[in-house]
Image (spheres, helix red, strand yellow):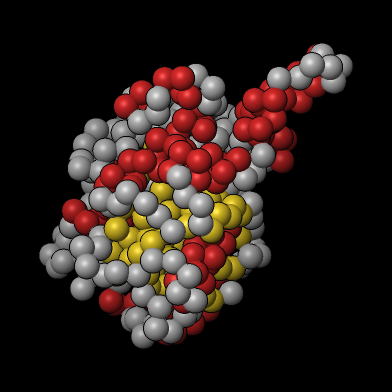
Amino acid sequence: MKISLPGTNVFIHGLSAISPQKTWDSTVFLPDITDYGDSPLSCLLPDFKAFIPPLQLRRLSRMARMGITGAKICLQDGRADRVDAIITATGYGLQEDMARFLRELLEQEEQQLPPMYFAQSGYNAMAGMLALFLRCSGYNNNFVSRGLALETALTDALLLFAEEEAQNVLLGAFDEKSPQQYGEFIRLGYFKREKTAHLSLFASQTAGTLPGEGAAFFLLSSDPSQALCRLQGLHIIPHPCDNQTLTDELTNFLAGYNVQKEDIDAVISGISGDIVRDEACRHLEKTCLSAATLIRFKHLMGDYATASSFALWLGTMILRHQCIPPAVLFSADREISRPLRTILIVNHFLGKSYSFILLTSPL
C-alpha cells in the first residue's frame, strides 16, 4: 500500500527518543554507546522529575513516564507549546500494567481492585494521558497494528494534513519488553534462545533477534520553515515478501517519487540479526541499495513492533547533524563526500510486514 498525497508536504520540526542508548538529548547524537553484553536491553531513562510534577509522577507506570517525558522533550525541541492533534502507535500496548491488573484480578478474586493499573493498561491510555498533560482537546487517536503501527499512525497524520484538519501533529510510538511477551516469542522462535552480545548481533547465524523497547515522538507540521527534514514518502507491505517481491516493491515506490537508487545517500536497514527472517532485506542491501551508505540500528536497541520509530528518529538526526555516528555505520569503507539529502528507511518486523519511509532535506 503506497501512501502518496499530491500537494501535501509534511515536515518534522522536533523529535525525541528514549531507548537503550542515551538518545533523549537531541543536541548530541549518540556520543557514547552503552554496552549491555548479553544482558537484556532496557531503556536509559532521563530525569522524569524535570518534566512531570512529583505528585503525578508517583502514580504513573514506567512506560507512561517515558511517553509523557518523551512528548514534552519533543515539543521543547520543536519550540512548540501546543499541538492540534495527538496520534500514537503501539504494537502491544502497556503490557506490564495489563499483567499487573490481571494478576491482582486473580489474587484478589475480583474484589476491591485498584483502578490505576486498569486505567493505564489500555492501548489508548498513552494518547489520553498525553492529551491531559498537554491540554490538547483536538483530534486524538491510537493505532495498534503490530509491526506496522507507526506506519499506520503516519498514514493518519498525512490524511489530517491533506484534509487541512491540523497545522501540527504530535506523533508518538512506544513499546515495552515484558516477561510475558518474551516467553511467548521464545516459544515461537522470534527471539534468540542462546545468549548473544547485542553489539555482535549481526554476526549471529541463528534464527531470532533480541528483544528491545523504546518510545519516540515527532512534531509534524505543514510549515517548511525551520524544519529538520521532509517526510516525502511512505510505503506499507502488510505481508511476508520474498527477495524479488520486495525488490519490485522498492523499485515501484521510488519510481512514484521520481527518485533514482543513485539519489539515495544512506539506507537505514531494519536487519534484526535473524538469519531466517532477514533474508529479503539482506538481498535488498546487496543488490538494489549497494551504492548507498548502509546504516543499521537494531544492535543498539533490539527489535520491537514500533522499532521503525527509532529508525525515523535516526534518519532525522542524520539529516539534522549531517553526520552518521560510527556505531550505526556499516559502510566503513565508503567515504561520505557529499551532503546527506535523501535517506531511505527499510524495516521489517518478524518477516511478516515491511515498510519504506523516504526522508529528504527540507529545502
Quarter of the figure with residue 226: bottom left
Position of 90 relative to 244 (above/below): above
| Residue at the far left in the pictured view | 337
**Is residue 138 something one can see in this rendering?**
yes
Quarter of the figure with residue 229: bottom left
| Residue at the far right in the pictured view | 109
Q: Nearer the viewer, residue 172 or 309?
A: 172
Q: Position of residue 168 (x, y in %)?
A: 38, 61
Q: Position of residue 227 (x, y in %)?
A: 25, 63
Position of the C terminus, as image quadrant, is bottom left
For the point 59% across and 52% down, the residue is 142
The number of callouts visible is: 0
Q: Position of residue 108 (x, y in %)?
A: 82, 14
Position of the N terminus, as image quadrant, is bottom right
Position of 27 relative to 193 (above/below): below
| Residue at the far top in the pictured view | 108
Q: Image check: 112 left or right of 216?
A: right
For the point 29% across and 58% down, the residue is 13
Q: Nearer the viewer, residue 243 or 118?
A: 118
For the point 25% across and 50% down, the residue is 79
Q: Nearer the viewer, residue 186 or 22?
A: 22
**Is residue 216 something one can see in this rendering?**
no
Q: Position of residue 66 (x, y in %)?
A: 45, 33
Position of 83 relative to 61 (above/below): below
Position of 71 relative to 340 (above/below): above
Q: Image check: 32 left or right of 196?
A: left
Q: Image check: 317 left or right of 178?
A: left
